[in-house]
């Protein structure tokens, strides 16, 4: 279910959600039909399993008493073929149990879709990005009795430039980024964007402003091209001109993420299948493709939660340099301002590299 967060960050809810609704509707229809007809299948299979040996024994006894030996042999062969029907019959008998498991999974999916959201988006305000602020925020995860992850915590996120945040594991760095994305609301204090509390901001406007890359990179079962295009609005894909122009944009993002050479070395290039959750690629390769998606987003504020945790020192330095270039106005001339970046590295060495490469 963590892939839902990826879809939301990349403004790609519409198409996957529509597909999910169609799949759920289809599963519901099949489930209704199966509930009606599976008992019939089970009854037929039961009679077949019980009747085959009895029928075979009775018929053989009658035939052996009345026919010649050659006819008996022929009928034995026929009965052998009849006995071979046990395999399909057993498969038919197992069908109800197998489908029952499938429909149990479908019920869990429906239950998930009926869950109440962690936050309710009702805001209508819309403004340009002028920085964010966590103002004396206290937050503990819902349903947990542990101490607050953040207590009376304040932070100013600048309008442009790079803000590096370092600290021991478990001190709330990732939680802070998720509060900036409004995955949850704090129990006390408030989070503001351009001086406006997040609950009052229109969700679509906020997601156009923000992008985030988390510790885990989730790819979807499909091609590398499809996993990159999810970061672009449908309007940009339709109006992107010739396929070569769109591919050039994808290749530029891959080059910034230090993964273009790998893609070019693959037989199918951008059309390479990544497998379910990207399991045909290494963790480092998945992470760099995820970084390329962030470069495609063209957001005003980009949050990086340990973006180089699975890379070696050389590629870490290359990607930190790319993040530095992302923050510069010449890389985002259409915005008229520098892009703001919040960088949370995992290792202290990464922050030292960042100090050298990014001049934090």
Image (cartoon, rainbow, N blue to C red):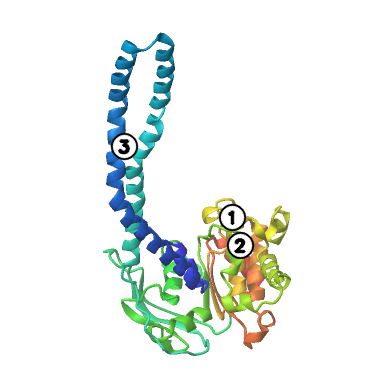
Secondary structure, mark 2, is helix
10 Å crowding of disc 1: few (<14), some (14-19), many (20+): many
Q: Do tag 3 and tag 1 residues touch (Cβ < 8 Å)?
A: no
Classify the position of the C terminus by image quarter. Answer: bottom right
Question: What residue is pinned by disc 1?
Answer: 274
Classify the position of the N terminus by image quarter. Answer: bottom left
In the image, residue 20 above or below residue 70: below
Q: Residue at x 56, y 53 (%)?
A: 275
In the image, residue 58 above or below residue 269: above
Question: Measured from the top left, where is residue 215 in percent x and y?
Answer: 50, 62
Question: What residue is pinned by disc 2?
Answer: 289
Question: Measured from the top left, where is residue 276 in percent x and y?
Answer: 52, 54
Secondary structure, mark 1, is loop
Of the numbered discs 2 and 1, the one sitting upstream in the chain is 1
10 Å crowding of disc 2: few (<14), some (14-19), many (20+): many
Q: Residue at x 67, y 60 (%)?
A: 270
Q: Do tag 2 and tag 1 residues touch (Cβ < 8 Å)?
A: yes
**Residue 216 visible in rendering:** yes
């Amino acid at each position: 279910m963590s892939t839902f967060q990826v879809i939301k960050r990349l403004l790609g809810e519409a198409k996957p959600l529509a597909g999910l609704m169609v799949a759920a509707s289809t599963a519901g229809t099949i489930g209704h039909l199966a509930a009606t007809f599976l008992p019939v299948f089970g009854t037929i299979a039961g009679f077949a399993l019980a009747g085959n040996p009895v029928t075979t024994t009775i018929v053989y006894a009658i035939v052996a008493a009345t026919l010649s030996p050659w006819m008996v042999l022929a009928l034995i062969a026929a009965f052998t073929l009849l006995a071979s029907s046990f395999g399909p019959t057993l498969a038919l008998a197992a069908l109800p149990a197998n489908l029952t498991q499938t429909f149990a999974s479908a019920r869990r999916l429906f239950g998930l879709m009926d869950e109440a959201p962690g936050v309710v988006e009702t805001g209508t305000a819309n403004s340009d990005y002028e920085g964010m602020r966590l103002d004396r925020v206290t937050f503990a995860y819902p349903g947990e009795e542990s101490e607050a992850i953040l207590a009376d915590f304040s932070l100013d996120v600048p309008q442009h430039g790079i803000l590096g945040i370092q600290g021991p594991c478990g001190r709330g760095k990732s939680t802070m980024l998720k509060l900036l994305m409004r995955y949850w609301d704090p129990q006390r204090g408030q989070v503001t964007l351009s001086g406006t509390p997040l609950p009052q901001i229109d969700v679509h406007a906020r997601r156009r402003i923000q992008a985030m890359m988390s510790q885990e990179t989730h790819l979807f079962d499909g091609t590398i091209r499809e996993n990159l295009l999810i970061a672009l609005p449908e309007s940009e894909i339709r109006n992107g001109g010739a396929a070569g122009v769109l591919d050039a944009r994808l290749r530029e993002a891959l080059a910034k993420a230090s993964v273009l050479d790998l893609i070019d070395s693959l037989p199918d290039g951008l059309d390479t299948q990544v497998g379910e959750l990207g399991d045909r690629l290494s963790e480092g390769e998945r992470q760099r493709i995820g970084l390329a998606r962030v470069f495609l987003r063209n957001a005003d504020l980009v949050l990086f939660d340990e973006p180089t945790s699975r890379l070696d020192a050389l590629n870490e330095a290359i990607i930190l340099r790319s993040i530095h270039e992302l923050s510069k106005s010449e890389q985002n001339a259409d915005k008229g301002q520098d892009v703001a970046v919040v960088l949370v590295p995992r290792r202290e060495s990464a922050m030292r590299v960042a100090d050298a490469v990014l001049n934090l």
